[in-house]
């Protein structure tokens, strides 16, 4: 029963619990890295896009 309770509350404040801030900081840093790398890459909006309903091409 104690193992099940620890699995349900694994992000608590005890010493043996997982550190949530580590996960949040790592994911935030990864997101910022992705945005910084692709910041200068913008899609070409003058391309033609196929309309899914009528099947014709229209300019974006």
Image (tube, rainbow, N blue to C red):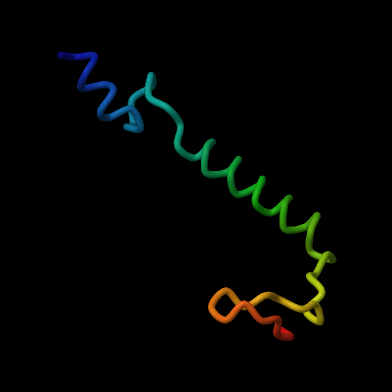
Give the camera-side residue of 5 and 13: 5
Does 16 appear above or below 22? Answer: above
Q: Residue at x 66, y 45 (%)?
A: 30
Residue 53: x, y in percent? 53, 78
Quadrant of the drawing holding the N terminus: top left
Task: Spot the residue most to the right.
Answer: 40
Residue, far bottom: 59
Q: Is residue 47 rendered to the left or right of residue 15?
A: right
Q: Tell me where residue 36 appears, x and y as whole percent.
A: 77, 57
Quarter of the rendering containing residue 60: bottom right
Closer to the camera in the image, 34 or 14: 34
Q: Residue at horizontal 80%, vertical 77%?
A: 47
Q: In percent of the image, x 25 and y 28: which residue is there?
A: 8
Please say if 13 is above or below 41.
Answer: above
For the image, the number of numbered tags is: 0
Determine the residue located farthest toward the front in the rendered image. Answer: 55
Identify which residue is drawn at 82% across, 74% down.
44
**Observer-nearest residue: 53 or 28?**
53
How far across and how far down the image is residue 2, in percent?
Answer: 19, 14
59 horizontally vs 19: left or right: right
- State left or right for residue 40 relative to residue 26: right
Q: Nearer the viewer, residue 60 or 23?
A: 60
Q: Is residue 5 above or below residue 11?
A: above
* Rendered image quadrant of residue 56: bottom right
Question: Image check: 15 left or right of 49?
Answer: left
């Amino acid at each position: 029963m104690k193992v099940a309770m620890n699995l349900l509350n694994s992000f608590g404040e005890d010493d043996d619990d997982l550190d949530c801030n580590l996960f949040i900081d790592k994911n935030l840093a990864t997101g910022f890295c992705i945005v910084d790398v692709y910041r200068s890459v913008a899609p070409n909006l003058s391309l033609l896009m196929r309309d899914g309903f009528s099947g014709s091409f229209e300019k974006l």
